[in-house]
Image (spheres, helix red, strand yellow):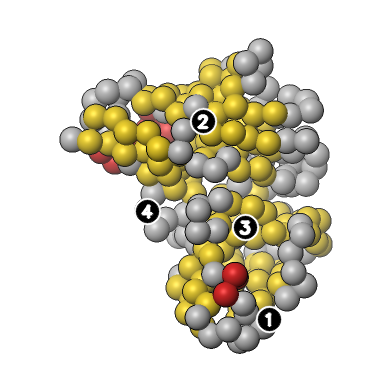
Amino acid sequence: DTAVSQTPKYLVTQMGNDKSIKCEQNLGHDTMYWYKQDSKKFLKIMFSYNNKELIINETVPNRFSPKSPDKAHLNLHINSLELGDSAVYFCASSQLAGESDTQYFGPGTRLTVL
Amino acid sequence: AQSVTQLDSHVSVSEGTPVLLRCNYSSSYSPSLFWYVQHPNKGLQLLLKYTSAATLVKGINGFEAEFKKSETSFHLTKPSAHMSDAAEYFCVVSRGSTLGRLYFGRGTQLTVWP
C-alpha cells in the first residue's frame, strides 16, 4: 500500500534518447510535484500540479514536460537527454498546495545518462 | 525571499549521545519549517514540521526542533542517537503562498558511531 510510487526505480540511457518517469499516489491528494536531486544531494522543485493544472514551473529546460492525466498521476517526460540530466528525480504529493501542507515523497528514480 | 542554511554538512556522534543538527532560515514572514530525513537510496520522510503553533515541535523517532524567531533558527535535536539515525537530514522552508513551493537546505549527513 505504497503512498507515492515511482517507476522505474533506475533508468540508464544514452544521450539524445527520450524517456519517461511515472508517478502515482493513492493518498487522494490534489497536488503533485517533481523534484530533482543533484549529485550533491541538493533538492530543487521542478513542477507542481494542482487538480491536473500546472501551478509551478521553475526554470527547467523545455525538454522536460510533465503530464497529469488525472489527480493521482504525474508523469515526467524528458526529450533529448543530456549528461547533466543525470540525477535522482522525486515525485511528491500533498493534500493541497498550501505552505503548511506536508509533502509525501516517492522513493525516487535514479536517472543515469551515458 | 526564502532560504535555508544548514550550518554543518557532516555531523558525527557516538551512539547514545545527543544529536544537534543546525538550521537557520531567512524569510520575509513567518514561514512553515520542516525537517525531512533521507536514508541511503530511499525517499524523503517527514520528521516534523512547524506551522506557527507551539514553538517546540516533537516529531517521529524521538526527534524534536525548536522554532526561535529571534535567532531565525530551527535546530533539530535528539537526546540519544541510535545507529538507525544515520542518514541525510534536510531543513526545509515553505514559501508563504498557496503554491506549496519548498526550499531545501543543502543537507546534513549524520554519522552514528557504535
Vertical arrangement, residue B80 with respect to residue A76, above or below: above
Q: Kindly identify the residue that appears in the image at 77 percent across and 64 percent down.
A: A52
Q: Position of residue A101 (x, y in %)?
A: 66, 40
Chain to which mark 4 belongs: B
- x then y, percent, for residue B24: 60, 27
Residue A29 percent coordinates (x, y): 66, 53
User: Cα distance, mark 2 to mark 1?
Assistant: 37 Å
Say which residue label 2 marks. Answer: B7
Q: Is residue A51 visible?
A: no
Marks 3/4: CA distance?
Answer: 17 Å
| Badge 4 amino acid | Pro
- Residue at position x 41%, y 25% in the image: B20
Disc 3 crowd rating (10 Å Cα; few below 14, some 14-19, many 20+) is many
Q: Earlier in the sequence, mark 3 or mark 1?
A: 3
For label 2, the SS is: loop
Q: Residues within 10 Å of mark 4 (few under 14, many from 20)?
A: few
Give the residue pinned by disc 1.
A79
- The span from disc 1 to disc 4 (Cα, nearest Å) is 29 Å
Q: In 3D space, how far apart are the residues under numbered discs 3 and 1 (Cα atoms)?
A: 17 Å
| Up/down of B12 relative to A29, above or below | above
Taking the image as shown, residue B112 lies to the left or right of residue B2, namely left
Q: Which mark is residue A35?
A: 3
Viewer-side label of 2, 1: 2
Q: Secondary structure at mark 1?
A: loop
Q: Judge if badges 3 and 2 mark residues of a common chain.
A: no
Q: What chain does mark 2 sit on?
A: B
Name the residue that disc number 4 marks.
Answer: B40
Asked if labels 4 and 1 touch by Cβ distance under 8 angstroms, the answer is no
Front label number (3 vs 2)? 2
Quadrant hosting residue B34: top right
Write down the quadrant of residue A55 in the picture: bottom right
